[in-house]
Structure formats: structure tokens, C-alpha cells
Amino acid sequence: MMKTIGIIGLNETTLRYAQEFRKFGETAGATGSGRELLKLDIPLFSSVQELLDYGQPDGLIVASPAELEDCTLPLLLCAADAISGLSDYPAPVMTARALHYAPIIIHARELIASGRLGQIHSFHFSDGNMDLILHLTGAKPLSVSMPGQCGVIKFENGLSGTFNRSTACGQIYEFTGSAAAMRLDLCGEIKVYPFDSRGLTETYEFDYSGNPDCNGGTTMLEHFRDLLDGTATAPHTTVAQALAAAALAQAAETSCKEDGHYVAL
């Protein structure tokens, strides 16, 4: 059975999601002032309640704050200010982190989760993306020190890592484990370097050229569809993870202002 979505806050991003969602279902309607963006035949409603009453969607893509106390539909959140206040929400809530659903990120996370690297001891990343490093490691951050453009993060399982906020060296993520090291280049390559004497370097390449799904947007919406029809029960990108990443980034800024002293989350 085809599923339908409603959009709260029509903009370029949610319009693109509506277009991509047509591979899996339809858009029941939207709220917002985006008539000039309305390149698809999507009904516009004047309020969220009107959208729920007359559009009757199976789930909602939320790009602007809304009153959802009486709503029980699965949510895909596209805006940071729409995240708070949903700790007791009765249905699945996922955050729109399309990059997390990109094939290169899915494969990197599988390599880490499978134990291919062994026990991870340290990492370094060069673009300041706190949300992605939490997604890849699955670890809970405890404190952060950032005396300048570089910083250190400590986690509860003994893992620690360094980062810098500059992308001058590209978007690179490097992990060192007990069995192997891994280098993830978001331009499209993963390399695994086994530590045993006979281990050969493993290379995984991801060609973005002409691939509309390389950024993960379609895969993300497919997973949201799975939440709507019950074939998936939990989101891969959670509100808790988004809040932890925001708290980590804020703690890093506080540390920077305090001469690099460690700031607990």
C-alpha cells in the first residue's frame, strides 16, 4: 500500500524530499508560504491541523516548529529548532541526516560495527562534524577540550579522538583500532590497513558521478517509508544523537573561550 507524507514548512529541501519520496509514495499536502516553490502538485494547507484533518498523511516531514502534542505519526525532522520537547513522543522520530545514509557512510559504519578494526582506540577527523563522528562510533561523549581550531573528545568507553574545524585538508576521518586502521575520505574512498604481517590494504571506492543517490537522501526517505509501514521500528538517526552532537559542539565552543579547559557534557 502506498504511503503518504505531509510537510510542515515547505522549502527547497522539503520540496526535494517530496520529489524523491514519489519513488515510495505520495505527498498528501504541505503547510508554509512556498507557492513559488510548488513545482509539484501538492495541496497547500493553512495550518498543521488542517493538513492532518484533510490530508490525512501517514507521516510528517517537519522543517519548522509546530504544535504536535496530539500527533502520533512518525516524524522526519529537518530543523534543529523542531527537535526539543519530543522525548515522550509516541511514534518513531528520525532526524534528516542524509549523509548518514550515503553508501560510503553505511559501509564505513558496517566495517566499524563488524569489528573489522578491532577495538577502536583513537580517531581524528578534519571537518568538525560532531554528528557524523557520533554516528560512526556509536560512542557517548563525556568531555571536550578545544584550545583553538583543534580539539580532543573523551568518551565513556575510554575512546578519545582529535579533530579540527578546518576542511582545508578535506573531509577525512581516520580510525585506529587493535586490528586495523581505517581512512575515510568523504570524496569517495575508504581504505583499511590491517596490522597483521600478511594483511593487504583494502580499498573501497564510491563513484559519485551521475549517481543521484550518493548523498543518501533517497536511502533516508526509503528508511522513513519503512517506519511508516512498520517494516522498520527504529530510526538510524535519532533525536538523542542530534542533541548529543549539538551539546558537544556547544561544549567545544565553551572550552575554546576558556583556554582549552575540558568541558563536561
Image: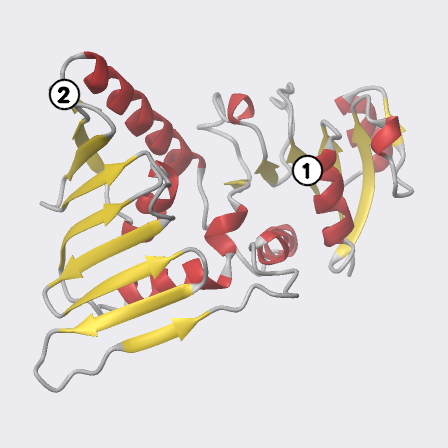
Q: Is residue 230 left or right of residue 151?
A: right
Q: Is residue 118 left or right of residue 81?
A: left
Q: Is residue 58 above or below residue 240?
A: below
Q: For the point 16% across and 83% down, which residue is it? A: 199
Secondary element at image label 2 = loop
Residue 243 x %, y %: 38, 29
Residue 235 x %, y %: 49, 48
Q: Which residue is mark 2?
A: 260
Q: Is residue 24 above or below residue 150?
A: below
Residue 249 x %, y %: 32, 27
Q: Is residue 226 left or right of residue 188?
A: right
Q: Which mark is residue 95?
A: none
Ranked by sequence position, the earlier of labels 2 and 1 is 1
Q: Residue furthest front?
A: 168
Residue placed most toward the observer, 154 or 145: 145
Secondary element at image label 1 = helix
Residue placed most toward the observer, 38 or 253: 253
Query: Can I make out residue 86 in this image?
Result: yes
Q: Residues within 10 Å of mark 1 (few under 14, many from 20)?
A: few
Amino acid residing under circle 1: Thr
Amino acid residing under circle 2: Gly
Marks 2 and 1 in Cβ contact (< 8 Å): no
Q: Quadrant of the N terminus?
A: bottom right
Q: Quadrant of residue 262?
A: top left
Q: Residues within 10 Å of mark 2 (few under 14, many from 20)?
A: some
Residue placed most toward the observer, 54 or 128: 128
Q: Which residue is mark 1?
A: 13
Q: Quadrant of residue 48?
A: top right
Query: Can I make out residue 234 in this image?
Result: no
Q: For the point 17% across and 29% down, which residue is it? A: 143
